[in-house]
Image: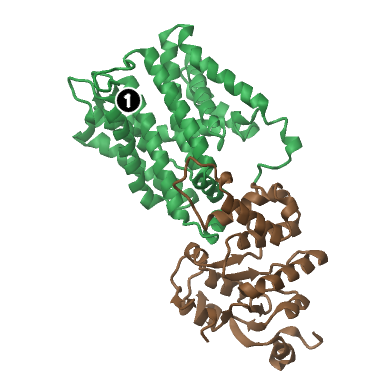
Chain colours: A green, B brown
Amino acid sequence: MSRKRISFAVALALLALFPFAGATFYTELVTKVMILAIFAMSLDLLVGYTGLVSFGHAAFFGIGAYTLGLVAPKYDAANLWLTLPAAMLAAGLAALVVGIFVVRAKGIYFIMVTLAFAQMFYFVFHDTKFGGGSDGISMNFKPVASIGGFTPFDLASATHLYYFVFAAMLLVFVFLRVLLRSAFGRALQGIRSNEHRMRSLGFPVYLYKLASFTLAGALAGLAGYLSAMQFGFVNPEIISWHESGNVLLMLILGGLGSLYGGVIGAFAFVALQELYQSVTTHWQLLLGATIILLVMFLPGGLASIGGLFKRTLVGDADDE
Amino acid sequence: MSDAVLRTQGLSRRFGGLMAASNVAIELQRGKLHALLGPNGAGKTTLINLLSGELRASSGSISYKGDDITRCSADRRSRIGIGRSYQKTNIFPAFTAFENCRLAAQSRTPRVLHIFADAIGYQPVCDAARRALEAAGLDGRAGQIASALSHGEQRQLEIAMVLATAPDVLLLDEPLAGMGAEEVGRMVALLQKLTPGHAILLVEHDMDAVFAVADVITVMVDGQVLESGPPAQIRSSAAVRQAYLGDGVDA
């Protein structure tokens, strides 16, 4: 446990100091990764803690991103404190509506209907003029964080943006961690473990799942918003099923049901991507092979490496 | 008959061409233990599933404390006081025994909006969980991961989880299955202790136990009620003897 804490503190310190290491390129890259980490953690709430394997989570990431694109004025900067909650609200609302339909489905059917809904969103943005069609929307200004004339930080600065995203990632991590210890969070984990028994104990399982789906959607919307802010650009590809698949892969890579597994997975995924891209144009082949090997030999994901040696002592405590 | 807590009328369930439960009329009263006997496939578990809401009735009705609950969902039935245990252990294997019961107790006070409070810190629910573990004889095993408990202990946990929901009606599906002699003795004592405050339906194959604790016995065969009455009546019934107990039994 203490070793876990130490590696945790070291990782935090490294991330906190990273922008001082130099190159803006890497600061921006790690910013991107931390946004993906938020996205992956939001999916972990569904897959790792509620037992809902969503294959359409990019839809809510996309809605968060598009919210900024759509509400941002053309010749002026949007206000962060208004547009960020609006993006989360929009994504959460979309997740609530989609959830009403999909949360009843189980297993493979749930996977397929979430995919189908995400594809519907994809084509709405791709084939209508509503969000700029396949060209998407470019934003000329980054949102400003001004509160009554006072601007505590400047999101146009790569370093400031980095720390803002870093803080958002920590906040999401702590929030989910606390949530998962609450009565609500424990009930979600009960549903993941044994949905049938939860129902027979008197839990309205459908409503719990719907709440989880909505919350995960809102948090994915936050990630989408941050991403749109970082790149100043949204297009339908961020909603495509590739993105839903990628975030699922990050989670599997890092490890389900531990929250930080999503963070590790996001870093590993992008690192591998960058590494292989620098070696070959067929990088996806290498990435695929790596993921297959990892799933075969490390089914608990990268987050389980530390516990690998302890497992024999603890027994099958976390087996189901 | 105002003291009937749970009552069915003409309750039937059809699976294709099979009548798994056919025109069943049964009544559970507070303070009475009602045992359900019958050979395998007689429809005992089907009846429990119908009462707990996990199966919908094809026809007939179920009333609970005067309200028609035939169309109520399983989770709602649990919340209004109908608790059930399972023949095949149905627990949260990765959680501790305590957490299994704590979750069960939590269903009575869900506190879903207290998202910033650790549920472990909410004493009323934790106390209910501890009491349930104690009642089922598991108080020394609270911290044990459920999947690491012995089979008998898992059966006790199964009961403890139902008790933690503080039900008025207990539907117990073979609670003694797979228990050792000592555990059976303890469970029989527990059933006797629970009977005054509950309406209990007990499905059980252990004849000695059934005749020791039952106030009323209903015998089912092929989805139908063959005979229902006090133990002495069932014991001396020629029909029951022929259909179920066999000729050589001197219970």
Q: Nearer the viewer, residue B223 or A223?
A: A223
Q: Is B243 displayed left or right of A217 in the figure? A: right
Q: In the image, what residue type sits under mark 1?
A: Ala
From the viewer's perspective, is residue B3 above or below residue B156? below
Residue at figure coordinates x 75%, y 59% from the top left: B152
Using the rendered view, name the quadrant where residue B83 is placed: bottom right
Residue at figure coordinates x 26%, y 34% from the top left: A126
Residue located beneath label 1 in the image? A228
Counting from the top left corner in percent of width and height, residue A106 is at 48, 52
Q: Which of the image's four quarters has the C terminus of chain B?
A: bottom right
Q: Residue furthest left?
A: A75
Q: Nearer the viewer, residue A233 or B218?
A: B218
From the viewer's perspective, is residue B210 above or below residue A237? below
Could you tell me which secondary element the residue under label 1 belongs to? helix
**Residue B1 visible in the shown view:** yes
**Residue A241 visible in the shown view:** no
Counting from the top left corner in percent of width and height, residue A280 is at 49, 16
Q: Nearer the viewer, residue B157 or A74?
A: B157
From the viewer's perspective, is residue A49 above or below residue B175? above
Q: Is B115 displayed left or right of A316 in the figure? A: left
Residue at figure coordinates x 66%, y 74% from the top left: B195
Q: Residue furthest top?
A: A22
**How many C-alpha atoms fall within 10 Å of the one at disc 1: few (<14), some, or many (≥20)?**
many
From the viewer's perspective, is residue B129 above or below residue A3? below
Q: Nearer the viewer, residue B36 or A51?
A: B36
Counting from the top left corner in percent of width and height, residue A154 is at 32, 15
